[in-house]
Image (cartoon, rainbow, N blue to C red):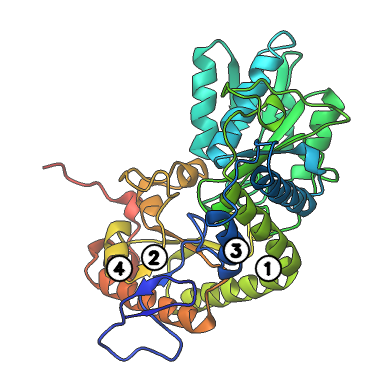
Amino acid sequence: MSTNGTGVVIAESATQLPEGVRLPIYMDNHATTPLDPRVLEAMMPYLTGIFGNAASRNHSFGWEAEKAVEKAREQVAKLIGATAKEIIFTSGATESNNLALKGIAEMYRERGNHIITQVTEHKAVLDTCKKLEKQGYRVTYLPVQADGLVDIEDLKRAMDDKTILVSLMYANNEIGVIQPIREIGALCHEKGILFHTDGVQAVGKIPVDVQKDNIDVLSLSGHKIYGPKGVGALYVRRRNPRVQISEQINGGGHERGMRSGTLNVPGIVGLGAACEIAMNEMEAEAKREQELRDYLKKKLENALDYVHVNGNMDHHLPGNLNMSFVYVEGESLLMGINDIAVSSGSACTSATLEPSYVLKALGLGDDVAHSSIRFGLGRFNTKAEVDYVSDKIIDVVQKLRELSPLYEMVKEGIDLTKIEWAAH
């Protein structure tokens, strides 16, 4: 047994592995990321000696905790071009999304009851919208084009005089597609509509600037940027326009009255440290991840036929690759590469055997959607690991296709769409 540099204990394979490769290999960084050792180092004092409640104003234990929280607030704000007073700490992006959508819907109810989102949003937004519909709000779920991008004309047509909020994610968690956020935000501002974005997958990976991008409210999470789980933030614009949000958790009026509850000081310190590291290393890390991603894509495309990439590759997260391996059953493929952590859908829905709703929204059939794998490359992945993963996938796909009568028929030039299958 040994560790892989991130503190994760791993079992080493009995077979000879290439230099620098330890199993299992983690390549699911959109689901969660390992804690960066530098983040843990920043958190440790607040897990031990500096244990005060940041709301305790009468002694040094509380002052120390509050000072650490305010430093983290500055670090988070700096990463996204905000001010510290615009950052509200939460338990994570799911809570941030709930607070943004429900809080704005409630606060602006007299102005209108219409919300616009898209069919490929994370469940934290979609399920919140479903809840709001039950409370009498109207929600428009925009379709996406075959490449995963929203059509701006569709968005314009959906807006009416009762629209109070548009919520469209910055970058998709499954297919890595980056929406034209700046353009969407400008359109919302022009119409006097508030614009929220779930920025979980984008913040810390690509440049995000809430001012330049015309964002009014943005959700982010610690565990997607090598910070701790259970902590996140919500950016809430303070001017032009000043956004007001009705609190969803009542209590001591913490976080400017928007989110009551004793602050998770070690988690918040970790989130702040993770944001600072991401800001300092973003450019170099994005370049490195994109090179690894393109290398992986090229290896797979060169060795296998009937593979295709899902999502627009010109507007794409650097570490994301979502590929369909047609004529291969996805579950069998995942079982064949069980020493590699990848995903066949988002982490929040991977317990179901339904094909990904995001891939279905792109127009993929169930069979192709089921044969798709999401690779999430991250800070601790290496070229040696990419070589191992690509070789393993090529080997497993080839073996599975040898067992596939459909693949054999296609290779023989038979058009499967023209076949009438007999029912038994």
Q: Secondary structure at mark 3?
A: helix
Q: How far apart are the two marked residues, 4 and 2, measured between alpha carbons?
A: 7 Å
Q: Residue furthest left?
A: 424
Q: Counting residues from the N terminus, which is met first, the one under dot 4 or under dot 3?
A: 3
Circle 1 Cα neighbour tier, 10 Å, few/some/many (<14 / 14–19 / ≥20) = some
Spatial CA span between label 4 and label 3: 29 Å
Amino acid found under the numbered disc labelled 1? Ala
The one nearer the camera, 252 or 191, is 252
Q: Which residue is mark 2?
A: 341
Q: Which residue is mark 1?
A: 286
The residue lying at 46 percent from left, 87 percent from top is 20
- Residue 99 in the image: x percent, y percent? 61, 29
Counting from the top left corner in percent of width and height, residue 90 is at 60, 38
Which residue lies at the image location 72% right of the left edge and 13% below the top edge? Answer: 162
Q: Which residue is mark 3?
A: 39
Q: Residue at x 55, y 40 (%)?
A: 91
Q: Name the amino acid, label 4.
A: Asn
**Front label number (4 vs 3):** 3
**Can you tell which of label 2 and label 3 is closer to the viewer?**
3
Q: Which residue is mark 4?
A: 338
The tag earlier along the polypeptide, 2 or 3, is 3
Q: Secondary structure at mark 1?
A: helix
Which numbered disc, 2 or 1, marks the residue that appears first in the sequence?
1
Q: Distance of mark 1 from mark 4, alpha carbons?
A: 27 Å
The answer to whether residue 250 shows anywhere in this view is yes
Q: Determine crowd level at label 4: few under 14, some 14-19, many 20+ residues with C-alpha closer than 10 A.
A: few
